[in-house]
């Protein structure tokens, strides 16, 4: 490997990925708070940061907080592999660059990065991180798709015979429920698996079955470059660890982008959040060798590191990377280290991450029962809520265990789903959704609101809590509880539904606005017994269909209101050919089916 110094590209030679206006807009919209907080400080952030003890051998090195031309001489040296040459790639927002080494680093070596300007979080111009040693471990068994049942618990449609989603029972569907449709992603049960949208009554609006053993997690509506999209994680699952990609589709259900993790990691199932800057917050799980003897485990043990990344959706550039291993002490975990050979220790189990208003990150680690604020510039843990070493005194009702889906709300409170039990005993408690307030001056956490199900549900895995306007909440009750519920601002249950198909789960559940017109055409089938012609019409994913119009070849027209995902329409007499049009509330045609040849009944 050639030994030489890598210099940052001079400003005149840099090629911008985006236009100047787009760069400025992205920087102002997404990083305004970050720039206000940190813009006056000198120092560049370096990722992987100095806390990292198990970076990928294929890692790149990210520099954030300065323009590439403002970096001094950059020297990258591996303790075993020596100096590394490489190339520079400017970040799309103009606030940093990535150094891509020509060669991979050596397993177990210490990498030093001399920057030429002060490194954020230090008094010098140098940063260090360690490369993980390779782990030898048998792959975990894949969570195989179950055979699809032909019982009434699984839906079937004449016009869309390839769709077999789980039936949903909406036991409560009040008009007081918030506007919007329901987003869930059925998996693991006797139905097809995939992202699914339901209307206010719990009736199917859209379903996309996934092939083979693939599952969908974290399905919801988001915004990408100012336009509404729907997103989900898609891939295969092995013991609640995912190997997949992030999917983004537009309001016609056409693909917009596919997101992958960077630096040699696999995108895990737990989080896929888009930001106003056109980036995605994601998580990766990676197993590395580790001495667990001080925790009662094996000296030659295996530990699971959790990697948080922010990646640019369009280019795949890694703009931020943080590792739980090295940042969170292993002793903070409530999960004991295993003694069995080849078994992984999962001490953190990070399951949600999002930007805070101050530019830092809020991270939830389930197996430490703790929320962390992570300094975006340095990767340092600024404070903890919950767990063994909380920075805040936990007031009455604020103690949570094995939580999911921690979110900072506009009023400064934090919401989360408190699972309560799995590794830890329930001790008579039930799962709930809570909102807590943090008093930064007094260092005290206070319970603001909690929502629990009237049936007293206990959910050991998965779950979500979405805060709604007016103080209400939409709650997904997690894996073993196939229930999703909405509470209004007074705490009343205004929507409550469950999957009817056996063993079906959804990782999270949301109620969100969504309006869509599919790129395809409505589907229909028709048959006749001579006395009448029966027509079945549907349009998978259309949200604005109010009624259907059947027009036969001889000019007969029959209209019928939409009665669900598939509407049955009766036309008198024997018909040979017809078309079906989807109409909105004003009677305007939204889409028309191909010409349908009528079959003979029986």
Image (tube, grey):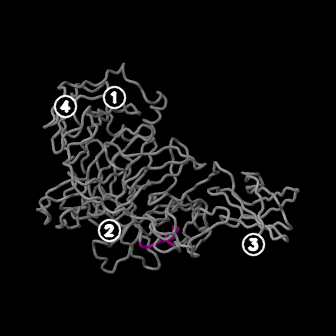
Q: Mark 3, residues whose alpha carbon is within 10 Å: few (<14), some, or many (≥20)?
A: few
Number of the front mark, 4 or 1: 4
Number of the front mark, 3 or 1: 3
> Which badge, 3 or 1, is on the more N-terminal residue?
1
Q: Which mark is residue 114?
A: 4
Secondary structure mostly seen in magenta is loop
Q: Mark 1, residues whose alpha carbon is within 10 Å: few (<14), some, or many (≥20)?
A: many
Q: Is residue 482 magenta?
A: yes
Residue highlighted by disc 3:
602
Q: In the depicted view, which residue is nearer to us: 560 or 225?
A: 560
What is the secondary structure assignment of the residue under circle 1? loop
Q: Is residue 83 magenta?
A: no
What is the secondary structure assignment of the residue under circle 3? loop
State left or right for residue 382 relative to residue 232.
left
Visible in this render: residue 236? yes
Whole-percent x and y of residue 200? 60, 65
Residue highlighted by disc 2:
400
What's the magenta region? 480-492
Q: Which mark is residue 67?
A: 1
Number of the front mark, 4 or 3: 3
In which quadrant is the C terminus drawn?
bottom right
Q: Give the Cα separation between the discs numbered 4 and 3.
A: 79 Å
Number of the front mark, 2 or 3: 3
Q: Give the Cα separation between the discs numbered 2 and 4.
A: 42 Å
């Amino acid at each position: 490997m050639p030994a030489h110094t890598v210099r940052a590209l001079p400003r005149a030679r840099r090629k911008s990925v985006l236009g100047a206006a787009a760069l400025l807009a992205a920087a102002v919209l997404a990083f305004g708070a970050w720039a206000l907080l940190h813009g006056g400080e000198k120092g560049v952030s370096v990722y992987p940061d100095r806390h990292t003890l198990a970076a990928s051998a294929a890692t790149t090195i990210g520099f954030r907080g300065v323009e590439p031309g403002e970096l001094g001489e950059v020297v990258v040296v591996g303790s075993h592999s020596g100096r590394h040459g490489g190339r520079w790639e400017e970040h799309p927002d103009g606030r940093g660059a990535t150094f891509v080494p020509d060669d991979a680093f050596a397993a177990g070596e210490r990498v030093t990065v001399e920057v030429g300007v002060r490194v954020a979080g230090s008094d010098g111009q140098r940063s260090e991180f360690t490369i993980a040693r390779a782990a030898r471990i048998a792959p975990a068994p894949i969570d195989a798709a179950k055979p699809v049942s032909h019982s009434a618990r699984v839906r079937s449609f004449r016009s869309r015979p390839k769709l077999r989603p789980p039936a949903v029972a909406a036991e409560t569907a009040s008009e007081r429920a918030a506007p919007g449709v329901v987003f869930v992603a059925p998996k693991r049960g006797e139905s097809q698996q995939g992202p699914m949208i339901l209307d206010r009554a719990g009736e199917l609006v859209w379903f996309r079955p996934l092939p083979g053993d693939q599952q969908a997690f974290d399905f919801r509506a988001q915004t990408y470059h100012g336009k509404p999209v729907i997103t989900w994680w898609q891939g295969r699952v092995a013991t609640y660890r995912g190997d997949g990609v992030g999917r983004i589709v537009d309001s016609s259900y056409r693909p917009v982008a596919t997101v992958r993790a960077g630096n040699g990691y696999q995108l895990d199932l737990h989080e896929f959040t888009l930001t106003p800057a056109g980036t995605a917050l994601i998580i990766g799980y990676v197993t590395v060798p580790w001495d667990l003897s001080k925790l009662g485990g094996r000296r030659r043990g295996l530990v699971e590191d959790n990697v948080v990344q922010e990646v640019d959706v369009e280019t795949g550039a890694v703009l931020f990377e943080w590792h739980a291993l090295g940042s969170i002490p292993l002793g903070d975990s409530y999960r004991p280290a295993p003694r069995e050979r080849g078994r992984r220790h999962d001490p953190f189990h990070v399951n949600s991450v999002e930007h805070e208003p101050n530019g830092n990150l809020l991270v939830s680690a389930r197996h430490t029962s703790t929320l962390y604020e992570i300094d975006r510039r340095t990767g340092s843990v600024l404070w903890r809520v919950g767990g063994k070493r909380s920075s805040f005194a936990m007031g009455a009702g604020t103690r949570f265990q094995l939580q999911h889906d921690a979110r900072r709300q506009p009023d400064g409170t934090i919401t989360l789903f408190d699972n309560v039990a799995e590794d830890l005993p329930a001790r008579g408690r039930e799962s709930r959704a809570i909102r807590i307030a943090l008093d930064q001056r007094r260092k005290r956490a206070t319970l603001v609101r909690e929502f629990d199900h009237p049936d007293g549900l206990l959910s050991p895995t998965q779950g979500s809590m979405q805060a709604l306007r007016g103080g209400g909440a939409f709650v997904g009750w997690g894996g073993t509880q196939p229930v999703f519920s909405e509470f209004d601002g007074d705490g009343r249950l205004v929507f409550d539904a469950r999957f009817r198909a056996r063993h079906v789960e959804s990782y999270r559940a949301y109620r969100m606005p969504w309006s869509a017109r599919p790129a395809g055409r409505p589907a229909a089938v028709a048959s006749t017994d001579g006395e009448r012609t029966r027509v079945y019409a549907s349009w998978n994913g259309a949200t604005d269909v109010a009624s259907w119009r059947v027009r036969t070849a001889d000019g007969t027209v029959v209209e019928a209101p939409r009665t669900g995902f598939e509407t049955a329409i009766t036309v008198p007499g024997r018909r040979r050919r017809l078309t079906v049009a989807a109409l909105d509330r004003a009677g305007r045609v939204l889409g028309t089916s191909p010409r349908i040849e009528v079959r003979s009944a029986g």
